[in-house]
Structures are given as C-alpha cells and as structure tokens.
Amino acid sequence: QVQLVQSGAEVKKPGASVKVSCKASGYTFIGSYIHWVRQAPGQGLEWMGWINPNSGGTNAAQRFQGRVTMTRDTSISTAYMDLKRLRSDDTAVYYCARDGGEVVPYPDYWGQGTLVTVSS
Amino acid sequence: SYELTQPPSVSVSPGQTARITCSGDALPKKYAYWYQQKPGQAPVLVIYEDSKRPSGIPARFSGSSSGTMATLAISGAQVEDEADYSCYSTDSSGNHRGVFGGGTRLTVL
C-alpha cells in the first residue's frame, strides 16, 4: 500500500532553515509528483508547491518562491522540502502528499505530517 | 493571488444533508477537490475532479460544480462525519499552482 513517512518534529530559531523529508513506498516514486502543504495551528491548509521526482522540476506558490527548495533522491524514494529564513509564523505542520492527477496535479495520499516550531 | 472561499462552519442534525460550498473565479474551468480532516490527523481525499469518489469513500459523499461554485454534499450525515472540510483547486494561469479554501468545520449534532 502507498505510504509516505515523514521525518520527525523540529524546533528552530528565527532565521534558521529546516529540511523535512518524505520517504515514499508502495508505488513507483518517479511516477507521481510530490506536493508540500502546511497547516499553521488552528488554521487551514496552505499549498506550498510540488516536485516532479522524475525530472526534478518544481512549481512553488508565489509567496514561497525564493525561500523554499524542493528536491528528491530517487535512489531512496525520498522527497525533501527545505524552508529558509524561518519566521515565527512558519510554525506549522508540514505535510507531503502524493499527486493523484493525470492531467492536473492534486494531492492524493498524505504523509503523517511534521511539526516545525519556530521560536527564539 | 487566487482565492477559494468557504463558509467557516456548517451544522446539521444526524441524518440530514450537509452542504458545503466553495467559490472561486476559476472554478468554471478548473476542477474542485475536497478533503476531510479530523483533529490530529492528515487530510483524506473524499472527492476529486468535482464529483468523483475515491475507492473506500462512502456513497453519501458527493460533489458537484456549477459556475463559480463547487459543492460537497453529505447525505444522511453521521456523527463520524464531523470534521473540517477543505476544497482545493488550481489557478487559471496554466501553471497548475494549487490553492486551498479556508476550510469549513462541519458539526453533526
């Protein structure tokens, strides 16, 4: 069965960077995009972007461009999301999700989430 | 930037039909997707491409879209359906950039 297992919780200081990993199994990793979505405490879901594991091409939401880097290591079926220059309002649960679309990308099956806390 | 608008909350009694709306200017040309999220859990896809149900999702969940509004309906809502529901779509730029609605808290009591 499809599984996305994310790395553990992180605590970072403002201005630092965080890198969250997402290990995929149960399907062909290079066959589906990986989306990144975050959710601040008590807030709604926010789409951050996706990566094409086959080509490495990425597509990030405008508000994260220049601050987020999405990469992958196909040899271990793992995607990464690196967010730089962290601020307190970056405190959130970060999810990876496998893409389900054949024509238009959309998040299908989700990882368990990674809590990132930004605090001085 | 593109936005999808949902009501913050909807309440129904058990057995009634719950309807949650999602409005966006690009919805006449873009599909809507719906996710259910219970406290402390990851979201689960319940409707894709406006009206299709993934395997394992009960038939009481249905979706429709007309003009600039997409609707998630839960017929015969059950207490276990109490959750947050979020719509998702892409903007009209052709870049396939995604956006979520603000989410709707469904209360069944």
Image: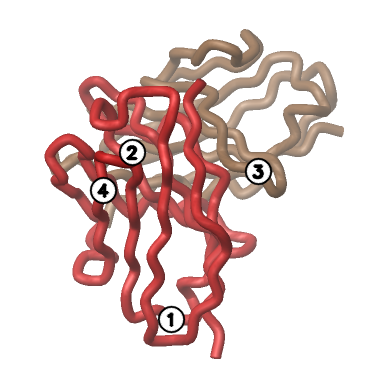
Chain colours: A red, B brown
Q: Circle 3 is placed at which residue position? A: B41
Measure how far apart labels 1 and 4 are at the Cα level. Answer: 25 Å
Q: Residues within 10 Å of mark 2 (few under 14, many from 20)?
A: some
- Cα–Cα span, label 4 and label 2: 8 Å
Q: Nearer the viewer, residue A114 or A7?
A: A7
Foreground tag (1 vs 4): 4
Residue that label 2 marks: A77
State the image quarter where residue A19 is shown.
bottom left
Q: Is residue A24 above or below residue B61?
A: below
Q: Tell me, for residue A72, which label it has, or none.
A: 4
- Return the chain for callout 4: A
> Residue at 25% across / 26% down in the picture?
A31
- Residue at mark 1 shares a chain with residue at mark 2: yes
To the question of a shared chain for discs 3 and 1, the answer is no
**At 56% from the left edge and 38% from the top edge, which residue is drawn?**
B43
Q: Amino acid at mark 3?
A: Gln
Judged from this view, the residue extending furthest toward the front is A75
Quadrant housing residue B10: top right
Disc 2 marks which amino acid?
Answer: Ser
